[in-house]
Amino acid sequence: MLDPLAALRTPDDPPCDVYLTGTVFLDIIFTGLDSAPVRGTESWARGMGSSPGGVANMATALARLGLRTSLAAAFGDDMYGEYCWEALERGEGIDLKLSRTVPGWHSPVTVSMAYEGERTMVSHGHEAPRPEEPAPDDPPAARACVASLQPGRRQEWIARAARAGSRVFADVGWDETGRWDPDDLADLEHCEAFLPNAGEAMRYTRTDCPRTAARRLADRVPLAVVTMGSEGAVAVDGATGETAEVPAISVEALDPTGAGDVFVAGFVTGTLAGWPLADRLAFAGLTAALSVQEFGGSLSAPGWVEIAAWWQRVRDFDEQDPAALSRYGFLDALLPCCARPWPLRRAVPTIGFRRA
């Protein structure tokens, strides 16, 4: 596997590159639906798969890009939990030493239905017995941490991680309270970068333009990155005043589940590797675009082989905007010299089968 940090590694490095904590779900994904399910009818999906979801989406995306990833999470002691643990530890090489199996607790489950480039999800789960999330009081030494901010609720491990020298990258979920009060994001003071989507960014800044929202957020955090879906992404460096914007790569979207997590993983990778801001933004957008061509969250995260195969293919065809492709010239110095033929075939994990 390509190591994007190979030139930077020293014997004194921390044992992991990125630490994160959160809830792992078992995701069951139905694809090939022609439309949304209709009440009182039965819908048949042409495709189905299962994979670890929730925070596992981010952990897998980081690991597949060659970062040494440590995850602290609770796992049920049911078959779903066993499957998720094995898929992450053995299948993806994620360090689960800080995770735990909770006796008598069943795994949270999400059923995702993908259609028309969107998805509808139904989830079920119960809080794990305390600690609800097994984040250690003192997070492990790591180059970086990825945190999902909780509006109105401080997470002490974020401050401790920042004080210990970890670079903290944060995103945020939908504010169910409807407050969208920027003061609810108190943990931003410990973060190096904040990466909300356009809807979240505009609500927190009371603006109607994602670019304006990015500039406003850069007053509160050193680096503000706002994803804009099919319009690409924009970033503002509050310290230097540098801005960057890249268009989205044109792809046929099958399932957007986990694309935001893949974007963050790509941006973290480029940042730790020391790339220019525009290259980081372009790379993050590319990894997210590749992910929506596959179904599922963690299952869809691309690795370097997939990225190399895409780069090899698009230069041989005229289906992409040349101006957009010129943004990716930096990949030539990074990618393996050989790539597998396109399209790629990926394993489809399922809990329905066991190894012989």
Image (cartoon, grey):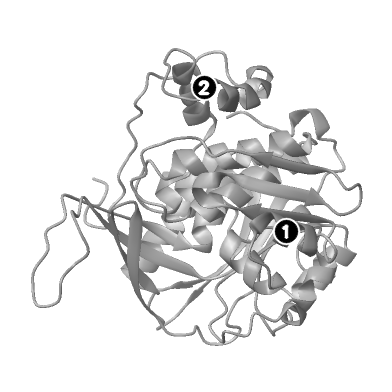
Number of labels in the image equals: 2
Residue drawn at x 35%, y 57% is 118
Residue 335 in the image, given as x and y percentages of width and height: 60, 21
> Taking 75 as reference, is 351 above or below it?
above
Residue 231 in the image, given as x and y percentages of width and height: 54, 45
Residue 154 in the image, given as x and y percentages of width and height: 74, 81
Which circle's residue, 2 or 1, is located before the other in the chain?
1
Residue drawn at x 48%, y 44% is 301
The quadrant of the picture occupied by the N terminus is: top right
Q: Quadrant of residue 282?
A: top right
The quadrant of the picture occupied by the C terminus is: top left
Which secondary structure lies at badge 1? Answer: helix
State the residue position of label 1.
Answer: 212
State the residue position of label 2.
Answer: 311
> Taking 21 as reference, is 144 above or below it?
above
Which secondary structure lies at badge 2? Answer: helix
Mark 1 nearby-residue class (10 Å; few <14, some 14–19, many ≥20): some
Visible residue check, residue 308: yes
Q: Residue furthest front?
A: 208
Marks 2/1: CA distance? 32 Å
Visible residue check, residue 15: no
Q: Amino acid at mark 1?
A: Thr
Comparing 320 with 96, the one in front is: 320
Q: Amino acid at mark 2?
A: Trp
In the visual, does 86 lie left or right of 131? left
Residue drawn at x 45%, y 52% is 298
